[in-house]
Image (spheres, coloured by chain):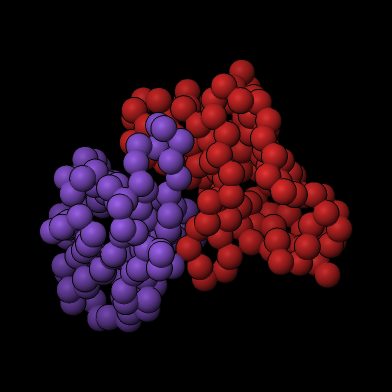
Chain colours: A purple, B red
Amino acid sequence: DAGVIQSPRHEVTEMGQEVTLRCKLISGHNSLFWYRQTMMRGLELLIYFNNNVPIDDSGMPEDRFSAKMPNASFSTLKIQPSEPRDSAVYFCASSPGQLLSGNTIYFGEGSWLTVV
Amino acid sequence: SQQGEEDPQALSIQEGENATMNCSYKTSINNLQWYRQNSGRGLVHLILIRSNEREKHSGRLRVTLDTSKKSSSLLITASRAADTASYFCATDLRETSGSRLTFGEGTQLTVNP
């Protein structure tokens, strides 16, 4: 399996522009997580889906952030408008089942976003 | 403070030495996992220990869990330069019904050849 696939790997954009990050889950996985990693705040959970349904978006920082899962294998994280403080590495991760049952999370390689 | 705090924040050792990293957490967990992150890469799962387990081994890795002290340790024996990475503990909290992992801030391990 190719693992969790994220695109783009690197993006530099100007403040105010819309940013769309994409993620393809591992086939058969039904949980999807978006994390953000910065030096200051570490790894933060932004939102998590189970079976395509958003379960908890309490980590989404503002209304400028939105995430969708239009089908079982694909998700997008959109920032509109982007701001310099959104600069971070955004990770998508998936899991084959409930973490309670001892499942683990498989991370993509991340999307490195710089907003100037 | 974040659930899952690693100690130390940074550790530098010589190849062949053992590396011990600690993790403390605040609330009850279902299980605790350790992940590794190489520079510029995503996190990779290393080992999982359930709340009813006290010790687990995987190759050169040994994980312990003390639920009474709400702490875990990760021991890497006979370290190699390739073990240089950041190591994170992640907890699956009972209060979230096992729905997510909460990560600590990580320990940066440097193994000098």
Please tell me which residue lies in front, B27 or A99.
A99
Can you say whether A48 is above or below B50 in the image?
Answer: below
Q: How many marks?
A: 0
Please tell me which residue lies in front, A15 or A4.
A4
Asked if residue A35 lies left or right of residue A22, the reply is right
Residue B8: percent from the left, percent from the top? 68, 46
- State the quadrant of the C terminus of chain B: bottom right
Residue visible at 80% across and 67% down in the picture:
B112
Q: Is residue A109 visible?
A: yes
Residue visible at 25% across and 81% down in the picture:
A14
Residue B11: percent from the left, percent from the top? 73, 54
Residue visible at 66% across and 26% down in the picture:
B54
Asked if residue A2 lies left or right of residue B53, the reply is left
Residue visible at 61% across and 18% down in the picture:
B68
Please tell me which residue lies in front, B2 or A31.
A31
Residue furthest out toward the top: B68
Can you say whether A68 is above or below A16 in the image?
Answer: above
Residue A38: percent from the left, percent from the top? 44, 60
Q: Quadrant of residue B64?
A: top right
Q: Is residue A85 visible?
A: no
